[in-house]
Amino acid sequence: MTQQCQQRDTNYMDRQCVAKTLYSIYTTSVLCSALRFCRQHEEQLKADACAKSLHLGEGGSFWQNVKRMSNGKATKYANCVADVTGDNNIAEMWKDHFAGLYNSVADSGYKSKFF
């Protein structure tokens, strides 16, 4: 009788071991699948998180996410714009550009109200 009990215990332990192994394989598979999804959709998930924080009215959190997502190694100032280099030259180029835009419409006397 004791041998039968031992055999039952061994069979039970074997089934438990198989069940644990199968569960481990299943959870590993699910984890790998979730990781693969996150890697493939990383940009979309980040954008969704930003949109959610903005929708909830958490402006600070939104801008922190934007800052975190932006390239921190990029230079903060442009070195070259439209083949123009140098701070003063770039500023002059933009001045001329916007002066051309604002002067392309007839004045109708509004300029005298502002100056």
Image (cartoon, helix red, strand yellow):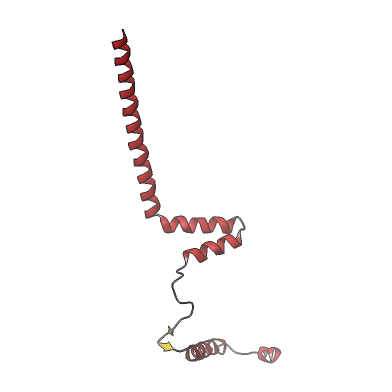
Identify the residue shown where x is 38% and y is 49%.
Answer: 35
Q: In this rendered view, identify the residue nearer to me: 56 or 70.
A: 70
Q: Name above or below for residue 59 compared with residue 106.
A: above
Q: In this rendered view, identify the residue nearer to me: 21 or 79.
A: 21
Q: Quadrant of residue 75?
A: bottom left
Q: Name above or below for residue 74 compared with residue 14.
A: below
User: Where does residue 107 sit, x and y in percent of width and height?
Assistant: 62, 90
Identify the residue shown where x is 60% and y is 55%.
Answer: 56
From this viewpoint, which residue is outermost toward the top? 1
User: Where does residue 59 sit, x and y in percent of width and height?
Assistant: 60, 62
User: Where does residue 66 sit, x and y in percent of width and height?
Assistant: 51, 64
Identify the residue shown where x is 60% and y is 62%.
Answer: 60
Q: Name above or below for residue 72 compared with residue 97.
A: above
User: Where does residue 91 sit, x and y in percent of width and height?
Assistant: 51, 88
From this viewpoint, which residue is outermost toward the right? 113
The quadrant of the picture occupied by the C terminus is bottom right
Q: Is residue 87 left or right of residue 6?
A: right
All told, the count of numbered labels is: 0
The quadrant of the picture occupied by the N terminus is top left
Q: In this rendered view, identify the residue nearer to me: 48 or 2.
A: 2
Q: In this rendered view, identify the residue nearer to me: 61 or 22.
A: 22
Identify the residue shown where x is 51% and y is 87%.
Answer: 94
Q: Is residue 61 left or right of residue 72?
A: right
